[in-house]
Image: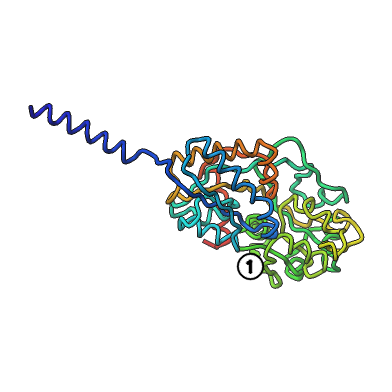
Protein backbone atom coordinates (compact mmCIF):
# COMPACT_ATOMS: atom_id res chain seq x y z
CA UNK A 1 0.00 0.00 0.00
CA UNK A 2 2.85 2.36 0.87
CA UNK A 3 4.52 1.68 -2.50
CA UNK A 4 1.25 2.39 -4.36
CA UNK A 5 0.86 5.67 -2.44
CA UNK A 6 4.41 6.72 -3.30
CA UNK A 7 3.91 5.92 -6.99
CA UNK A 8 0.65 7.88 -7.07
CA UNK A 9 2.25 10.79 -5.21
CA UNK A 10 5.19 10.88 -7.64
CA UNK A 11 2.87 10.80 -10.63
CA UNK A 12 0.73 13.57 -9.16
CA UNK A 13 3.84 15.66 -8.46
CA UNK A 14 5.01 15.29 -12.05
CA UNK A 15 1.56 16.33 -13.27
CA UNK A 16 1.54 19.43 -11.05
CA UNK A 17 5.08 20.44 -12.14
CA UNK A 18 4.18 19.93 -15.77
CA UNK A 19 0.98 21.95 -15.37
CA UNK A 20 2.78 24.78 -13.58
CA UNK A 21 5.58 24.93 -16.13
CA UNK A 22 3.32 24.68 -19.18
CA UNK A 23 3.61 27.89 -21.19
CA UNK A 24 0.50 30.03 -21.33
CA UNK A 25 -1.08 31.31 -24.54
CA UNK A 26 -3.50 33.51 -22.63
CA UNK A 27 -1.77 36.84 -23.25
CA UNK A 28 -4.15 39.59 -24.29
CA UNK A 29 -1.66 42.34 -25.15
CA UNK A 30 1.88 42.78 -26.45
CA UNK A 31 3.97 45.95 -26.57
CA UNK A 32 6.83 46.51 -29.05
CA UNK A 33 9.31 49.37 -28.75
CA UNK A 34 11.39 50.85 -31.56
CA UNK A 35 14.40 53.14 -31.12
CA UNK A 36 14.48 56.64 -32.71
CA UNK A 37 17.23 56.04 -35.26
CA UNK A 38 15.23 58.27 -37.59
CA UNK A 39 12.66 60.97 -36.84
CA UNK A 40 10.26 59.34 -34.32
CA UNK A 41 7.16 60.34 -36.30
CA UNK A 42 8.67 58.79 -39.43
CA UNK A 43 9.59 55.58 -37.57
CA UNK A 44 6.05 55.32 -36.22
CA UNK A 45 4.56 55.83 -39.68
CA UNK A 46 6.62 52.89 -40.98
CA UNK A 47 5.95 50.48 -38.12
CA UNK A 48 2.31 51.15 -37.26
CA UNK A 49 1.05 48.41 -39.65
CA UNK A 50 2.99 45.89 -37.54
CA UNK A 51 0.24 46.04 -34.93
CA UNK A 52 -2.24 44.25 -37.19
CA UNK A 53 0.33 42.09 -39.03
CA UNK A 54 1.94 40.61 -35.90
CA UNK A 55 -1.39 40.15 -34.14
CA UNK A 56 -2.68 38.08 -37.06
CA UNK A 57 0.49 35.97 -37.15
CA UNK A 58 0.39 35.22 -33.42
CA UNK A 59 -3.29 34.32 -33.54
CA UNK A 60 -2.39 31.83 -36.30
CA UNK A 61 0.12 30.33 -33.87
CA UNK A 62 -2.44 29.79 -31.14
CA UNK A 63 -2.50 33.10 -29.29
CA UNK A 64 -6.22 33.43 -29.84
CA UNK A 65 -6.83 35.64 -26.81
CA UNK A 66 -4.43 38.33 -28.05
CA UNK A 67 -6.44 41.54 -28.35
CA UNK A 68 -3.85 44.26 -28.97
CA UNK A 69 -0.33 44.63 -30.28
CA UNK A 70 0.96 48.14 -29.59
CA UNK A 71 4.00 49.77 -31.19
CA UNK A 72 5.81 52.79 -29.77
CA UNK A 73 9.00 54.76 -30.40
CA UNK A 74 11.13 55.42 -27.33
CA UNK A 75 12.54 58.86 -26.54
CA UNK A 76 16.10 57.50 -26.59
CA UNK A 77 17.97 54.24 -27.23
CA UNK A 78 18.57 53.97 -23.49
CA UNK A 79 14.85 54.30 -22.70
CA UNK A 80 14.11 51.28 -24.91
CA UNK A 81 16.74 49.18 -23.11
CA UNK A 82 15.47 50.25 -19.71
CA UNK A 83 11.86 49.46 -20.61
CA UNK A 84 12.78 45.96 -21.80
CA UNK A 85 14.93 45.37 -18.71
CA UNK A 86 12.05 46.43 -16.46
CA UNK A 87 9.44 44.43 -18.36
CA UNK A 88 7.35 47.51 -19.20
CA UNK A 89 7.69 46.55 -22.86
CA UNK A 90 7.75 43.00 -24.18
CA UNK A 91 9.77 43.27 -27.39
CA UNK A 92 12.27 45.89 -28.54
CA UNK A 93 14.30 46.52 -31.66
CA UNK A 94 17.70 47.28 -30.09
CA UNK A 95 21.07 48.05 -31.67
CA UNK A 96 23.78 45.63 -30.63
CA UNK A 97 25.42 48.15 -28.31
CA UNK A 98 22.20 48.89 -26.48
CA UNK A 99 21.53 45.17 -26.11
CA UNK A 100 25.03 44.58 -24.75
CA UNK A 101 24.61 47.33 -22.19
CA UNK A 102 21.22 46.28 -20.84
CA UNK A 103 21.38 42.48 -21.06
CA UNK A 104 23.95 42.00 -18.31
CA UNK A 105 21.50 41.26 -15.51
CA UNK A 106 19.74 38.51 -17.46
CA UNK A 107 16.33 40.15 -17.93
CA UNK A 108 16.77 40.64 -21.68
CA UNK A 109 17.36 38.02 -24.36
CA UNK A 110 18.14 38.46 -28.05
CA UNK A 111 15.94 36.28 -30.25
CA UNK A 112 16.79 37.47 -33.77
CA UNK A 113 19.47 39.41 -35.61
CA UNK A 114 18.67 41.49 -38.65
CA UNK A 115 20.18 40.79 -42.02
CA UNK A 116 20.54 43.57 -44.56
CA UNK A 117 21.41 43.89 -48.17
CA UNK A 118 25.17 44.11 -48.44
CA UNK A 119 26.60 47.36 -49.84
CA UNK A 120 28.64 47.88 -52.97
CA UNK A 121 31.35 49.50 -50.83
CA UNK A 122 32.74 47.80 -47.75
CA UNK A 123 36.39 48.83 -47.60
CA UNK A 124 38.04 49.62 -44.28
CA UNK A 125 39.93 52.39 -46.13
CA UNK A 126 37.90 55.63 -46.05
CA UNK A 127 39.29 56.93 -49.34
CA UNK A 128 37.78 53.96 -51.22
CA UNK A 129 34.27 55.26 -50.46
CA UNK A 130 34.92 58.68 -51.97
CA UNK A 131 34.51 58.24 -55.73
CA UNK A 132 31.51 60.57 -55.93
CA UNK A 133 29.25 57.67 -56.91
CA UNK A 134 26.27 56.37 -54.91
CA UNK A 135 26.75 53.41 -52.63
CA UNK A 136 24.27 50.78 -53.81
CA UNK A 137 22.74 47.67 -52.29
CA UNK A 138 23.57 44.14 -53.41
CA UNK A 139 21.38 41.06 -53.56
CA UNK A 140 23.57 39.26 -51.04
CA UNK A 141 22.78 39.54 -47.33
CA UNK A 142 25.17 40.77 -44.66
CA UNK A 143 25.17 40.06 -40.93
CA UNK A 144 27.17 43.17 -40.11
CA UNK A 145 27.44 46.79 -41.12
CA UNK A 146 29.92 49.58 -40.58
CA UNK A 147 29.82 52.98 -38.95
CA UNK A 148 31.19 55.86 -40.99
CA UNK A 149 32.26 59.35 -40.04
CA UNK A 150 31.19 61.65 -42.87
CA UNK A 151 32.64 65.08 -43.60
CA UNK A 152 30.22 67.66 -44.96
CA UNK A 153 30.49 70.79 -47.11
CA UNK A 154 31.74 73.13 -44.35
CA UNK A 155 35.29 74.50 -44.61
CA UNK A 156 36.55 72.17 -41.87
CA UNK A 157 34.70 69.23 -43.40
CA UNK A 158 36.36 69.85 -46.77
CA UNK A 159 39.76 70.22 -45.08
CA UNK A 160 39.48 66.79 -43.45
CA UNK A 161 38.06 65.15 -46.59
CA UNK A 162 40.83 66.54 -48.77
CA UNK A 163 43.45 65.20 -46.39
CA UNK A 164 41.95 61.70 -46.42
CA UNK A 165 41.53 61.69 -50.18
CA UNK A 166 45.17 62.73 -50.58
CA UNK A 167 46.16 59.59 -48.67
CA UNK A 168 47.24 61.46 -45.55
CA UNK A 169 46.52 60.20 -42.04
CA UNK A 170 44.24 62.28 -39.84
CA UNK A 171 45.61 63.46 -36.50
CA UNK A 172 43.79 63.79 -33.21
CA UNK A 173 44.12 67.56 -33.60
CA UNK A 174 42.39 67.36 -36.98
CA UNK A 175 39.42 65.54 -35.51
CA UNK A 176 39.26 67.41 -32.22
CA UNK A 177 39.03 70.76 -34.03
CA UNK A 178 35.89 69.72 -35.92
CA UNK A 179 32.26 70.08 -34.86
CA UNK A 180 30.83 66.57 -34.49
CA UNK A 181 27.23 65.39 -34.59
CA UNK A 182 26.88 62.09 -32.70
CA UNK A 183 24.10 59.89 -31.28
CA UNK A 184 23.20 58.58 -27.82
CA UNK A 185 25.74 56.83 -25.62
CA UNK A 186 24.67 53.30 -26.63
CA UNK A 187 24.16 53.92 -30.35
CA UNK A 188 26.48 51.46 -32.12
CA UNK A 189 26.98 53.44 -35.33
CA UNK A 190 26.55 56.89 -33.83
CA UNK A 191 28.83 56.68 -30.81
CA UNK A 192 30.14 53.28 -29.70
CA UNK A 193 32.11 52.12 -32.74
CA UNK A 194 33.45 55.59 -33.59
CA UNK A 195 34.80 55.50 -30.03
CA UNK A 196 36.34 52.08 -30.71
CA UNK A 197 38.12 53.54 -33.77
CA UNK A 198 39.34 56.58 -31.81
CA UNK A 199 40.52 54.31 -28.98
CA UNK A 200 42.46 52.10 -31.40
CA UNK A 201 44.06 55.03 -33.22
CA UNK A 202 44.50 57.75 -30.59
CA UNK A 203 43.59 56.18 -27.23
CA UNK A 204 40.66 58.61 -27.14
CA UNK A 205 36.87 58.30 -27.12
CA UNK A 206 34.02 60.32 -28.60
CA UNK A 207 33.55 61.81 -25.14
CA UNK A 208 37.06 63.28 -25.35
CA UNK A 209 36.16 65.38 -28.40
CA UNK A 210 35.92 69.08 -27.62
CA UNK A 211 32.98 69.80 -29.94
CA UNK A 212 30.73 66.74 -30.03
CA UNK A 213 26.97 66.96 -29.45
CA UNK A 214 24.14 64.40 -29.70
CA UNK A 215 21.84 65.32 -32.56
CA UNK A 216 18.79 63.34 -31.46
CA UNK A 217 18.63 61.21 -34.60
CA UNK A 218 20.32 60.60 -37.93
CA UNK A 219 17.91 62.89 -39.77
CA UNK A 220 19.04 65.76 -37.56
CA UNK A 221 22.66 64.76 -38.18
CA UNK A 222 22.29 64.94 -41.94
CA UNK A 223 20.33 68.20 -41.82
CA UNK A 224 23.01 69.71 -39.56
CA UNK A 225 25.79 68.47 -41.85
CA UNK A 226 24.11 70.11 -44.84
CA UNK A 227 23.65 73.36 -42.94
CA UNK A 228 27.21 73.46 -41.62
CA UNK A 229 26.08 73.08 -38.01
CA UNK A 230 28.35 70.04 -37.93
CA UNK A 231 31.58 69.51 -39.84
CA UNK A 232 31.37 65.74 -39.46
CA UNK A 233 28.73 63.26 -38.33
CA UNK A 234 28.88 59.61 -37.29
CA UNK A 235 26.30 57.50 -39.15
CA UNK A 236 25.48 53.96 -40.30
CA UNK A 237 27.05 53.05 -43.64
CA UNK A 238 23.94 53.34 -45.82
CA UNK A 239 22.61 56.55 -44.26
CA UNK A 240 23.62 58.68 -47.24
CA UNK A 241 21.37 56.53 -49.45
CA UNK A 242 18.48 57.14 -47.03
CA UNK A 243 18.91 60.91 -47.08
CA UNK A 244 20.01 61.48 -50.69
CA UNK A 245 16.61 62.88 -51.69
CA UNK A 246 16.33 65.19 -48.68
CA UNK A 247 19.83 66.52 -49.37
CA UNK A 248 18.80 68.20 -52.62
CA UNK A 249 15.10 68.82 -51.89
CA UNK A 250 13.96 72.39 -51.25
CA UNK A 251 13.79 73.53 -47.64
CA UNK A 252 10.07 74.28 -47.97
CA UNK A 253 9.65 70.63 -49.04
CA UNK A 254 11.33 69.43 -45.81
CA UNK A 255 14.66 69.09 -47.60
CA UNK A 256 18.12 70.48 -46.89
CA UNK A 257 18.30 72.74 -49.93
CA UNK A 258 21.68 71.69 -51.33
CA UNK A 259 22.39 72.16 -55.04
CA UNK A 260 24.80 69.22 -55.44
CA UNK A 261 24.16 65.58 -54.54
CA UNK A 262 25.07 64.09 -51.19
CA UNK A 263 27.68 61.95 -52.98
CA UNK A 264 29.42 65.03 -54.34
CA UNK A 265 29.31 67.11 -51.15
CA UNK A 266 30.21 64.53 -48.50
CA UNK A 267 33.17 62.22 -47.99
CA UNK A 268 33.98 59.35 -45.66
CA UNK A 269 36.89 60.11 -43.34
CA UNK A 270 36.61 57.18 -40.88
CA UNK A 271 35.44 53.58 -41.35
CA UNK A 272 34.92 51.50 -38.20
CA UNK A 273 35.21 47.72 -37.77
CA UNK A 274 32.05 45.74 -38.60
CA UNK A 275 29.11 45.95 -36.23
CA UNK A 276 26.90 42.90 -35.70
CA UNK A 277 23.39 43.75 -36.84
CA UNK A 278 20.48 45.07 -34.80
CA UNK A 279 18.54 42.76 -32.53
CA UNK A 280 14.97 41.90 -31.86
CA UNK A 281 15.07 41.27 -28.13
CA UNK A 282 12.54 40.23 -25.52
CA UNK A 283 11.96 40.85 -21.85
CA UNK A 284 12.32 37.54 -20.03
CA UNK A 285 10.03 39.01 -17.37
CA UNK A 286 7.05 38.91 -19.73
CA UNK A 287 7.89 36.55 -22.61
CA UNK A 288 8.08 32.79 -22.02
CA UNK A 289 9.86 30.19 -24.15
CA UNK A 290 6.80 29.34 -26.22
CA UNK A 291 6.01 32.96 -27.04
CA UNK A 292 9.69 33.54 -27.82
CA UNK A 293 9.60 30.77 -30.44
CA UNK A 294 6.32 32.09 -31.87
CA UNK A 295 7.80 35.59 -32.15
CA UNK A 296 10.91 34.27 -33.91
CA UNK A 297 8.77 32.45 -36.44
CA UNK A 298 6.39 35.38 -36.87
CA UNK A 299 9.07 37.98 -37.57
CA UNK A 300 10.93 35.70 -39.99
CA UNK A 301 7.69 35.01 -41.85
CA UNK A 302 6.60 38.67 -41.89
CA UNK A 303 9.87 40.02 -43.27
CA UNK A 304 9.37 37.61 -46.17
CA UNK A 305 6.15 39.40 -47.18
CA UNK A 306 5.73 42.67 -49.05
CA UNK A 307 3.80 44.21 -46.16
CA UNK A 308 6.30 43.12 -43.53
CA UNK A 309 9.31 44.18 -45.56
CA UNK A 310 7.81 47.68 -45.85
CA UNK A 311 7.59 47.89 -42.05
CA UNK A 312 11.15 46.77 -41.38
CA UNK A 313 12.54 49.00 -44.14
CA UNK A 314 12.64 51.74 -41.50
CA UNK A 315 15.87 50.11 -40.27
CA UNK A 316 16.93 48.72 -43.67
CA UNK A 317 16.24 45.20 -42.40
CA UNK A 318 15.60 42.71 -45.19
CA UNK A 319 15.67 39.48 -43.20
CA UNK A 320 16.05 37.96 -39.74
CA UNK A 321 18.10 35.05 -38.44
CA UNK A 322 18.00 33.35 -35.05
CA UNK A 323 20.69 34.83 -32.80
CA UNK A 324 22.12 34.09 -29.38
CA UNK A 325 23.60 36.18 -26.62
CA UNK A 326 27.11 34.98 -27.54
CA UNK A 327 26.81 36.69 -30.93
CA UNK A 328 27.01 40.06 -29.17
CA UNK A 329 30.12 39.46 -27.11
CA UNK A 330 32.07 41.81 -29.41
CA UNK A 331 29.50 44.51 -28.69
CA UNK A 332 30.14 44.05 -24.97
CA UNK A 333 33.85 44.49 -25.57
CA UNK A 334 33.07 47.68 -27.46
CA UNK A 335 30.98 48.89 -24.54
CA UNK A 336 33.86 48.17 -22.17
CA UNK A 337 36.20 50.25 -24.31
CA UNK A 338 33.77 53.14 -24.30
CA UNK A 339 33.11 52.95 -20.56
CA UNK A 340 36.78 52.50 -19.74
CA UNK A 341 36.07 49.38 -17.70
Tell me if mark 1 has few (under 14), some (14-19) or many (20+) residues whose alpha carbon lies within 10 angstroms of its own. Answer: some
Q: Is residue 182 left or right of residue 104?
A: right
Colour scheme employed for the rendering of this structure = rainbow
Nearest the camera: 152 or 313?
Answer: 313
Secondary-structure class at tag 1? helix
> What's the residue at 61%, 58% (across, down)?
73
Q: Residue furthest left?
A: 1
Residue behind mark 1: 207
Quarter of the view holding residue 43: bottom right
**Coordinates of residue 241 in the picture (x, y in percent):** 79, 50
Examine the image and state in which quarter residue 268 appears: bottom right
* Residue 8 in the image, given as x and y percentages of width and height: 17, 30
Residue visible at 54% across and 52% down in the picture: 99
Which residue is located at x 56 percent, y 52 percent? Answer: 70
| Residue 110 percent location from the top left of the image | 52, 46
Q: Is residue 132 above or below residue 225?
A: above
| Residue positioned most to the right | 259
Locate residue 279 relative to residue 237 in the image: left or right. Answer: left
Amino acid sequence: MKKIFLVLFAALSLFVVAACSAPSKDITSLKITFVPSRDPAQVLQYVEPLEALLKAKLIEKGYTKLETVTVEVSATYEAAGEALDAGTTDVAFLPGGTYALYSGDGNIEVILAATRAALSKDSANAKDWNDGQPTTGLTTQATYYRSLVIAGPSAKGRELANKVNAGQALTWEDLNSAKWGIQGATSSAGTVYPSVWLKQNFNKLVTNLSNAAPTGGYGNSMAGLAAGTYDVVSIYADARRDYADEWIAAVNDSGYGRSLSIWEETDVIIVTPGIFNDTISISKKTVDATLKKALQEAFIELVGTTEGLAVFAVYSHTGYAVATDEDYEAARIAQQIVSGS
